Image: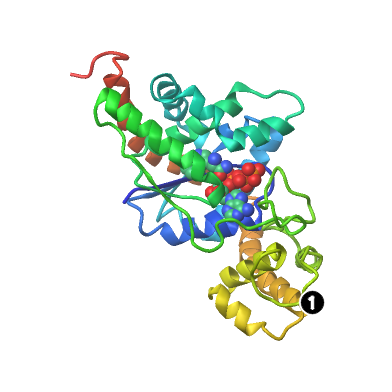
Amino acid sequence: MRIFSGIQPTGRKHLGNYIGAIRQYVHLQDEGDPAIYCVVDLHATTIAYEPAELRRQLYDTTAILLASGLDPARCILFRQSDIPQHTELTWMLAATATAHGDLNRMTQFKEKSAVQRELVSAGLFFYPVLMAADILAYGTDLVPVGDDQRQHLELAREIASKFNSRFSDTFIVPEGRIPDVGARIMDLQNPDKKMSTTASTEAGTIFVLDEPKAIEKKIKSAVTDSGSEVRRGEGKAGISNLIEILAVVKGVSMERIETEFADSRYGDFKTAVAQAVVEYLAPVQAKYAELRDDEAELEAILADGAAKASAIAAPIVAAARDKMGLGRPVA
Ligand code: ATP
Ligand code: LTN
């Protein structure tokens, strides 16, 4: 089973990214044939950014992935812009298998374009086509992502099918893998919205690299309801979110958390959540501190990953190019 996923080097990675995506990447790395993980720097250029900052955050994200347990000996880890097939295939798919109307319906485009101050770029509109190219260039069977990527994944499947029916079977139509618990961690200050790199407040977002004190403060000031019972339900989005976080972090069911804290007050429950999250992230933070400064080593890992990624993507994109009638005919 071929596994592929991408993660943006924008902003600082948060607990939603860790629980919804990175945790799955690590679990799946031995099940992939191979498992391929891509730091999608081209996607990050679709909103305002600084080139030097992008480079820095590329290393930050790579080091976080390694610190979380990705092992370059057991998976392929590479940088999107190192492999030209991603951009080439984006054009091919956009021109022949992507409906403009489908892109127009993408909720993430609507949300992100609404808050762009300077330029709403055509690249932001094409973002889901680039994501489809990432996935299809590798003959991917399974794509682990968080819940917010459902619509983009559905579009990637649609694009693959359209291309296949027009030019004959070329691409595998991929399946998504969205975790049952933890696929949509909510903003602690605004529990009706997902925790997000670009759209959340600092106080509502727990970053993977936050100091223990900051984590405690954010969880203790998380917005809850006027009730007092630690259980999920209508009007209890804040408490439900904390229950979900604690369940994932402790590796138990949400029911078990509700039973365990049935007699607790919100304050004590929040203390327990804070302590568990601090302990959960501590080993990642320690490992990150060891790895982050050696940028030459990070580059060496990415270069090795790019060589392996290229060997997979090149023949798949060459076959698609040939079917489209482009380039010199393949004998
Ligand atoms: P933004 O929130 O600004 O759109 P992002 O954090 O979603 O950015 P990425 O870093 O590329 O962007 O996301 C990496 C992975 O994290 C994706 O698989 C995404 O589905 C997942 N993810 C993002 N936010 C959450 C969340 N709040 N809960 C669970 N998973 C999430
Ligand atoms: N759009 C995704 C990141 C992404 C991705 C991919 C995920 C880019 N290419 C390919 C899975 C497969 C996001 O989470 N923001």
The amino acid type found where label 1 is placed reads: Gly
Q: Position of residue 207 (x, y in %)?
A: 70, 56
Q: Is residue 309 left or right of residue 234?
A: left
Q: Residues within 10 Å of mark 1 (few under 14, many from 20)?
A: few
Query: Furthest-left residue in view?
Result: 331
Q: Is residue 205 left or right of residue 70?
A: right
Which residue matches tag 1? 267
Query: Furthest-bottom residue in view?
Result: 263
Q: Quadrant of residue 139?
A: top left
Q: Is residue 191 above or below residue 176?
A: below
Q: Position of residue 153 (x, y in %)?
A: 46, 41
Q: Position of residue 31 (x, y in %)?
A: 35, 58
Q: Residue at x 54, y 51 (%)?
A: 147
Q: Is residue 7 left or right of residue 138?
A: right
Q: Residue at x 61, y 33 (%)?
A: 109
Q: Tell which of 41 and 103 is nearer to you.
A: 103
Residue 109 visible (yes or no):
yes
Q: Position of residue 252 (x, y in %)?
A: 53, 76
What quarter of the picture does the C terminus occupy?
A: top left
Q: Quadrant of residue 205?
A: bottom right
Determine whether the residue tagged by mark 1 lies in a helix, strand or loop. helix
Q: Residue at x 64, y 33 (%)?
A: 110
Q: Is residue 29 above or below residue 267?
A: above
